[in-house]
Image (spheres, helix red, strand yellow):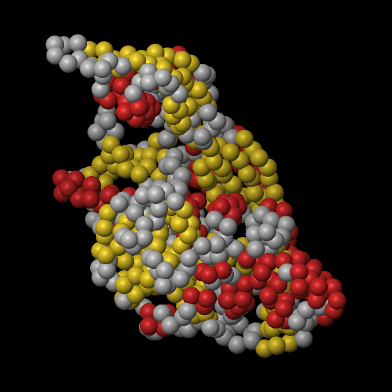
Amino acid sequence: MADVHLAEKAQKYPINKIRNIGIIAHIDAGKTTTTEAIIYLTGLRHKIGVVHEGDTVTDWMVQERERGVTIVSAAITTFWKDCRINIIDTPGHVDFTAEVERSLRVLDGAIVVLDSKMGVEAQTETVWRQADKYKVPRLFAVNKINQIGGDFYKTLESVKERLTPNAYPIVLPIGFEKTNNGWVDLVAMKAYQYNDYSDKSVKEVPVPKDMLESAKKYRTELMERVVEADDALMGKYLAEGDLSIEDFKTAIRKSTLSFDHEFFPVMGGDYRGIAVQTLMDAVVDYLPSPIEVVPAEGINPKTEEAVMCKPDPNNDFAALAFKVVTDPYVGRLVYFRVYSGTLQSGSYIYNSSKRQQERVGRLVLMYANEREEIKIVKAGEIAAAVGLKDTTTGDTLCSQDALVTLENIKFPDPVISMAVEPKTKSDQEKMGTALKKLVDEDPTFHLSTDPESGQTIISGMGEFQLEIKVDILKRDLGVDVNVGAPQVAYRETVKSEAEIEGKYIRQSGGRGQYGHVYLRLKPLGRGEGFQFVDKVVGGAIPKEYIPAVEKGVKEAMSKGVGWGYPMVDVEVTLFDGSFHEVDSSEMAFHIAASTAFQDGARKAGIQLLEPIMKIEVAAPEEFIGDVIGDLSSRRAIIEGTESRGKSQSVRAQVPLAELFGYVTRLRGLTQGRASAPYIEPSHYEVVPVNIAEKLKK
């Protein structure tokens, strides 16, 4: 661990001096390297870890170090100037987008790292939308300017085109590619240079003559934009034509924190080392403390009244669990963000999502995969707890006498599955426990049993995610398994509207069974899921039997009707029926509804849906024709191409079923010079009839 006592130091900082930030980006943009430079610059480590050498702090898993990619988000706490900075380094690979989702849910601000050779890449757009959803203030760090093809200004253009027009530089890099060795601070209108990126010292120099005119232009544009957020500062600027540095920073901060005046600062540099201090200064100066964001709002689960969780250590306790990991030394660790109140180790809390009491055995402050014990955690802080047996990702923890349930974290459904089976009897005994641990840790990793074959099925967001899970099973958890070929998570839906009658009547001596329903089935738009509408009037079916009808419909949908895959995007309306005062029961209505739904689906017509993936392929220009031709043979819809540095990028939508083994094929087509770093679930579409017929079970 770092050679400082983090816990003791961290807990001296008041809530207004805390910054909870995430580092988000496309894969290989430099998130982990930037985090390493922050750790080095702030004195937590005496060297800068290098991803390809496998010695970084936040990429601590064997699987991460071998592959050179971040797989799980890692939390560290560090300090800069007078602030405590809690940082979460998130994965850039789309298969692990859930790690970004749950991190952004509990963070107050974010640094968006961009590779200046590539500009805005596909996964950058995904994490940008995730941050938009949670209204997280952001700033841009345009990275790798020192590398061949690195271009700050071209990257700034791509940000304005693909993400937001409200992005304005506050720091300009000095030098181009290998000559990059400093920056111009547009707020103070001062320039700084260094000899080597790993130095911890810089010297102030005059703004380079060849940059002076453009620096003044960018500074004026910046000032005119940010004064819009403050009428008083606008008046000052109009009267005097300039602002003091203090007023300028105030205007930038107000604009960055205001979603009414959407604004995102942009900085450029070589963020392997000393230039990262511009980021840290911006985090302190422009990103919010926990008291400057909209307070978390939940509901009282008993009264269903709104509850505002004000970020005050003296208020009632409320926190959100956002991550679960199994630590080999302390067992099950639950990461949580405290929105209100204070929690002490050894105390009892209430899980309002599960409606049960839990005891906090120990509290720890995390430093990647290491930890330091703490006695107390307060509003605005992020910590982990040992001893919470039933708390899972998205659960709310609160005081038993001040109930609140915060909004859960929503994750996408898996789109790919494969069968796993133990190699030996001893593996069989261990496999179930090991898989449940993995499911506990990752909300996008699902476990099920095939009812026909009895096989254990694991499901996830992509082939890479499942590959990693199997590797963890074998190496970390000691379970040797065989795996089957990946399978597509198809779905079914109905083609048109249909009305159907369903009856379940049995007489066998004594009390019989009687359930009678009329259902109307209607297709919904893609992604709208399932809706159940109760339109029974006049007591034709007693209210106590309505939930049994809905349950029967859901059961029939889960099994599918045409191909045996779950049904989605259907509205089912219960509009009439009848009951028997003696013979009717929940079971009878459950069976009647299930049978009616199946018959109604056949009457409406059933069609098969398949997951469509967004894909972006980067390849040298001479191979683009082959790449596009191969994608077209896979039923792809080509959305466009664009130049990215010295390569071309192809964006397309491709059915998942056509992508198995694609990366290997792509390497063969392009002599190993192309890559597909972005393959993300997009939506479901109807499978062509000729292909659907071949998939009949």
Comparing 132 with 25, the one in front is 132
Is 89 left, or right, of 333 in this rendering? right
Instruction: Determine whether 348 is above or below 302 in the image.
Output: below
| Picture coordinates of residue 432, whole percent (x, y) | 23, 47
| Picture coordinates of residue 697, whole percent (x, y) | 36, 22
| Picture coordinates of residue 82, whole percent (x, y) | 53, 83
Name the image quarter holding the N terminus: bottom left
Residue ranking furthest to the left: 509
Instruction: Using the rendered image of the protein, determine whether residue 142 is visible from the camera's viewpoint.
Output: no
Instruction: Determine whether 164 is above or below 87 in the image.
Output: above
Instruction: Determine whether 446 is above or below 74 in the image.
Output: above
| Residue that appears at 37% across and 18% down | 540
Is 106 left, or right, of 196 in this rendering? left
- In which image quadrant can residue 348 be found? bottom left
- Figure label count: 0
Instruction: Using the rendered image of the protein, determine whether residue 532 is visible from the camera's viewpoint.
Output: yes
| Residue that appears at 26% across and 58% down | 357
Is 617 left, or right, of 243 in this rendering? left
Is 429 left, or right, of 273 in this rendering? left
Instruction: Determine whether 215 is above or below 348 in the image.
Output: below
| Residue that appears at 78% across and 79% down | 243
| Picture coordinates of residue 591, whole percent (x, y) | 29, 21
